[in-house]
């Protein structure tokens, strides 16, 4: 049966649950489950009644994941297909998959429920497709989703997770702490001492590491750390604009700012333009990521390159090892970051 929802979308109507089948056959749900899964410890008459109920009600048997029989196909699940960061991840994963002779299926977990986590519909599709493994480039997964993956024994690797994954989960990321050190040391080398940071989410792993690197570089240089110079914008461009306005309104505003993502740096640029300030004459700005946007803005953005394509390729190679039964010795792999100098940083004016 096909239904059209209120928004005009077409979807397949849900079939009967196993509980409905069990009630129709006059058996318990565990017994009905044994018949569906081909277990032998069911009496012939009971098996017949359950099978007839399954057929009569049109119950659809969901295939369970079987890594040994699955085709060599992996899924890449991302938050969105629209960002340039996702494009870099896709490029790296696709090239690595081609070299390994794998098919790769890309999907976006766009729908979010009340918990703020991606909803489970796309997880169910992984089993239906018979994927051999999954690469996740998502901001985060919920605890129930990790449990679901464990229950179905689907191998997976996280690419650049925002939050620290549970113990035992394999992930690939960038050397965020060192990147924060590199960005701050670059500004210090130009003669800046009033250096602010516009960070991402307050309690996330990557943002916290970048801010820790910033603090470490200031401490090593003997430069006073100012609490009012640390602002959090949740990796949101509009929020970064507001945080930069706040920094400019301080009695002693900074002369340079380390922005923990290139997207947020666009908001910082906008705030400076509003005030009639020029980059880098009035304010030096350094970003983090080296997305294409960093080269397009005026002036082009000095930034710390995060090797997104290489991270995705590394994650795929780790996933292949897990699929072959070899769990990595270390669950966390970090790839080096590097400074990319452009025109947005200069010595402080005057």
Image (tube, rainbow, N blue to C red):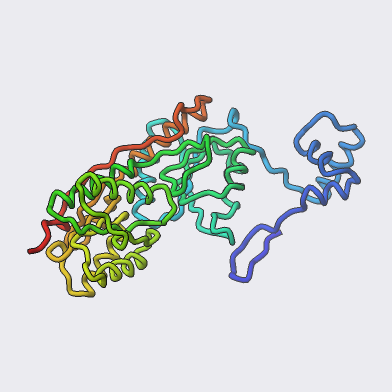
**Is residue 295 shown left or right of residue 83?**
left
Q: Is residue 332 visible in the rendered structure shown here?
A: yes
Q: Residue at x 44, y 46 (%)?
A: 161
Q: Is residue 292 visible in the rendered structure shown here?
A: no
Residue 7: percent from left, percent from top: 59, 70
Q: Residue at x 64, y 66 (%)?
A: 4
Q: Quadrant of the C terminus?
A: bottom left
Q: Nearer the viewer, residue 135 or 338?
A: 338
Residue 319: percent from left, percent from top: 47, 33
Q: Nearer the viewer, residue 178 or 46?
A: 178
Q: Nearer the viewer, residue 154 or 45?
A: 154
Image: 232 above or below 155: below
Q: Nearer the viewer, residue 27 or 149?
A: 149
Residue 135: percent from left, percent from top: 47, 41
- Residue that extends furthest to the left in the rendered view of this protein: 350
Image: 140 above or below 156: below
Q: Disc count in the image?
A: 0
Residue 143: percent from left, percent from top: 58, 47
**Is residue 58 shown left or right of residue 121?**
right
Q: Quadrant of the N terminus?
A: bottom right
Image: 175 above or below 56: above
**Is residue 295 shown left or right of residue 89?**
left
Q: Residue at x 85, y 46 (%)?
A: 22
Q: Residue at x 34, y 42 (%)?
A: 174
């Amino acid at each position: 049966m096909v239904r059209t929802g209120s928004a005009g979308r077409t979807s397949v109507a849900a079939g009967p649950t196993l509980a409905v089948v069990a009630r129709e056959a006059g058996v318990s749900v565990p017994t009905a489950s044994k018949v569906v899964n081909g277990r032998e410890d069911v009496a012939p008459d009971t098996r017949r009644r359950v099978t007839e109920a399954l057929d009569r009600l049109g119950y659809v048997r969901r295939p369970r994941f079987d890594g040994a029989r699955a085709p060599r196909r992996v899924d890449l699940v991302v938050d969105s297909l629209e960002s340039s960061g996702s494009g870099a991840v896709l490029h790296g994963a696709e090239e690595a998959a081609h070299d390994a002779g794998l098919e790769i299926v890309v999907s976006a977990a766009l729908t979010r429920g009340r918990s703020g986590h991606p909803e489970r519909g796309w997880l169910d599709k992984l089993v239906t497709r018979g994927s051999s493994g999954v690469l996740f480039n998502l901001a985060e997964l919920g605890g129930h989703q990790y449990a679901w993956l464990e229950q179905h024994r689907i191998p997976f690797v996280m690419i650049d997770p925002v939050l620290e994954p549970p113990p035992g989960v394999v992930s690939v990321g960038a050397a965020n702490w060192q990147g924060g050190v590199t960005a701050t040391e670059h500004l210090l080398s130009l003669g800046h001492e009033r250096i602010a940071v516009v960070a991402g989410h307050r309690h996330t792993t990557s943002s916290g590491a970048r801010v820790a690197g910033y603090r470490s570089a200031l401490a090593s240089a003997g430069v006073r750390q100012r609490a009012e110079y640390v602002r959090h914008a949740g990796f949101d461009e509009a929020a970064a604009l507001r945080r930069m306005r706040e920094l400019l309104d301080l009695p002693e505003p900074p002369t340079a700012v380390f922005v923990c993502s290139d997207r947020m740096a666009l908001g910082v640029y906008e705030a400076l333009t509003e005030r009639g300030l020029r980059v880098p004459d009035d304010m030096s700005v350094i970003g983090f990521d080296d997305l294409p946007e960093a080269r397009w803005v005026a002036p082009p953005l000095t930034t710390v390159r995060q090797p997104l394509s290489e991270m995705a390729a590394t994650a795929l190679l780790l996933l292949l090892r897990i699929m072959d039964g070899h769990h990595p010795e270390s669950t966390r792999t970090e790839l080096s970051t590097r400074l990319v100098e452009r025109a947005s940083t200069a010595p402080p004016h005057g």
